[in-house]
Image (cartoon, rainbow, N blue to C red):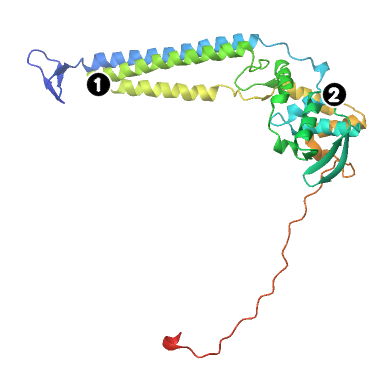
Amino acid sequence: MTDQQCWYTSKPVMTGFMGGEIEMIGSWPGTVSGLVLTALSTAVVLWSWHVEEIRWKELAATADPVREPDEGVTFYEYAYLNHHYGTGNTLAVALVRMHTQRRLALVGKEHAKYYFEVNDPVPQDDIEAMVLDLLVQQKGSLASYICLIDRDRSPLQPMHRRLVADGLLRERGLPAGVPADSSQATAWRARRRAAHRLRGCLLGALVTLGGAVAVVSGAWPPLALHVTALLALAVWRVRSRPPEEWGTTDEGEAALRALWNAELDPEEAQTRLIARRGLDALPDHHPLALVPAPPPDRDEPREEPPPVINFDPPGLGGL
């Protein structure tokens, strides 16, 4: 494609491979058009962020009131808040309590495994029901490091949701106090996806139009500024927004500290320690104390065979 001057006008034209001519609009109008498109894309991004902030505040306003500090947390909730990525310490609290109340009888143990006999098959809560189900499935045996073999949180969902609704636990990408399965969160996610699709279509159309203007006018700097501005806004947005990871909230941390610093009787203090550290917190004389791992087998040093000296003369060719 070559540039030439048209005989009937002073504006440059581009001659295509098929012989057609495209009149160029000139660098000054192209520059202005490119800058206008850049300003429009920036306005679209900033307006979409503004709408997102408004909808985020509306969603946060639907949260239930935070649990009062005097209400405290149970030992199950204390274990779950300390280790909400697994269920091991929560199950350990129920396991030790059932053994202390003689509803479970320890009939044997070895490294990383217990063997129980169930004296009372009626659970007192959902956590004990989980322990009894595990014993039924594994025919009376139970791994000592429960958190390493059990990652299913579905039986704990009612407690998980209650902690989230009470403002002690935060769901990923949601304000504190809003459960992930609530109708408000579902509607907010649907509206957010629709807004992201609309913003993507508008930005795609504006960038495409800016590219067409740059091709026709030959004014490429506005297009480079257009793309650079969008990338800079995206990076700034990622770095400026606070993380929305799931985890314990400030109120949840305060509840954990309150229970940890509370004065309890020896039995409850031991349960609190188990909720925090698991079965490793049991003293060595406790029946459920973990059995240490056996030392690694070390093979006895083998005697080296005596060297064999061949006194025969070499054969043909020195072999």
Give the residue displayed 78% in from the left and 53% down from the top: 294
Query: Is 80 placed above or below 147 here?
Result: above
Q: Is residue 270 visible?
A: no
Query: Percent from the top left, x then y, of residue 140?
Result: 81, 38
Q: Quadrant of residue 257?
A: top right
* Disc 2 element: loop
Q: Which of disc 1 and disc 2 is earlier in sequence?
A: 2
Between 102 and 289, the one nearer to me in the picture: 102
3D distance between C-alphas at marks 2 and 1: 75 Å
Q: Which quadrant of the structure image shows residue 157?
A: top right
Q: Amino acid at mark 1?
A: Val
Disc number lying in front (2 or 1) = 2
The answer to whether residue 289 is left or right of residue 219 is: right
Which residue position holds label 2? Answer: 124
**What's the mark number on residue 215?**
1
Figure quadrant of residue 126: top right
| Residue found 80% across the figure and 17% down from its top | 69
Q: Is residue 157 left or right of residue 28?
A: right
Query: Element type at marker 1?
Result: helix
